[in-house]
Amino acid sequence: MKADRDLIIIGGGGAGLAAAQYAARANLSPLLLEELATGGQALIIDRLENYPGFPEAIPGTELTRLFEEQAVRFGTEIKYTGVQKLTWSDGLFTAHTDDGPLTSLAVILATGAKHRTLGVPGEKEYAGKGVSYCATCDGPFFKGQPMVVVGGGDAACDETAYLAHLSDSVLMLHRRDRLRAQKALAERTLTNPHIQVRFNTELKEIRGNAKVQEVLLLDNKTGKTVAQKTSAVFVFVGSIPQTRVIEGLGVKLDQGGYVETDQRMQTSLRGLFAAGDVRATPFRQLIVAAGEGAIAAHTAAQYIDELKGDAYR
Ligand code: NAP
């Protein structure tokens, strides 16, 4: 079995970079394939407050730089290319990239998850014209102006806190009567004087001219609708696992489409491991993604040793 590489890692977020560092230290010379930029979701986090070891908080971009530097220092090669498809035949995986096929004995899938959209009228039309999915990227365009945030989870609370530094009029809408976010984040959101949280409220339509001007809101308790003036709509309503590249491999997914693994990150296809937000995991956090990446690399190393007859028994 002659492969280009022992191990290919697809995706350069927290899980992929941690897997790369551990795999490199296990002498696997991993190749990490990343389409755009390393860092994944951490890239859009202005202040990471809960990553252990950084009591003063650290920008996601800086933590990404450190993750990458460490992975590369131990021997990871990072190649910037899109992966269209992963296939498997006779014990070899082939990553079909924009720059041609690359084969490996094992693969760690660390492709993460992408933001979900609301699917309401006006959302597509005003994307980039007031509708955004990233507060740190687009918030500064609306400095001092009224903004609306949709969502009740950790991401919505984190991003709303960032927006509240830019405007004293941030309206957060949540469809239920309490926030889903972790208690500390929820508490901070509810007590921020620049943030107004409106519960039992659904955003039904985004309207404007060349740019967003107002949103139509439904109070799902009373059934009443009201129009609300705003310059921007920030949407943080969860994520969709990025599993397109493994379509056709028959890998077991859960009901939400996340990849199922055992506790060693082995998927239902031997030699294919998954880590981070793409995996069916109970708690999507950077620390968890990094931990899963480390486990995936460790298990992949053992698998490769077994294939080569080098396993320590
Ligand atoms: P999430 O936890 O799934 O929350 C999504 C929120 O959006 C929920 O409150 C949900 O409402 C709401 N929602 C979903 N579809 C909606 C729709 N069509 N209309 C209106 N509201 C809708 O997603 P997330 O906040 O993006 O977080 C994803 C993962 O990343 C989580 O595991 C989270 O812990 C993690 N994360 C952690 C941090 C941090 O620790 N600082 C920061 C960001 C993300 P319901 O509650 O009614 O379902």
Image (spheres, grey):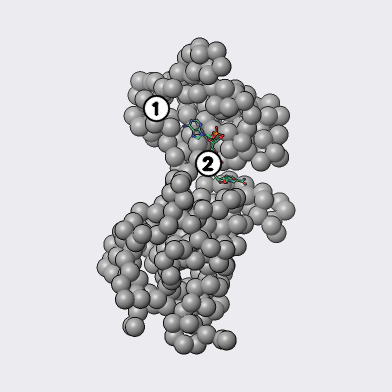
Counting residues from the N terminus, which is met first, the one under dot 1 or under dot 2? 1
Tally of numbered discs: 2
Q: Nearer the viewer, residue 191 or 119?
A: 119
Q: Quadrant of residue 207?
A: top left
Left or right: 253 as drawn, with respect to 85: right
Inspect the image, locate mark 1, and give the three-letter code of the amino acid beneath it: Val
Asked if 90 appears above or below 253 in the picture, the reply is below
Residue 146 horizontal/vertical position (percent): 53, 23
Foreground pick, 170 / 246: 246
Dot 2: within a 10 Å radius of its alpha carbon, few (fewer than 14), some, or many (20 or more) residues? some
190, above or below 70, in the image: above
Image coordinates of residue 105 in percent, x first then y, are: 40, 76
Q: Quadrant of the C terminus?
A: bottom right
Residue at point 35%, 76% (across, down):
91
- Find residue 277 and report its horizontal and vertical position in percent: 51, 53
Compared to 216, does 175 lie above or below? below
One can see residue 309 in this view: yes
Q: What amino acid is labelled 2 in the image?
A: Thr
Q: Residue 231 carries which label?
A: none
Q: Position of residue 233 (x, y in %)?
A: 47, 29
Residue visible at 54% across and 33% down?
151
Q: In this view, does 242 lie above or below 206?
A: below
State how far apart marks 1 and 2 are (Cα): 23 Å
For label 2, the residue is: 136
> Which residue bears the numbered disc 1?
120
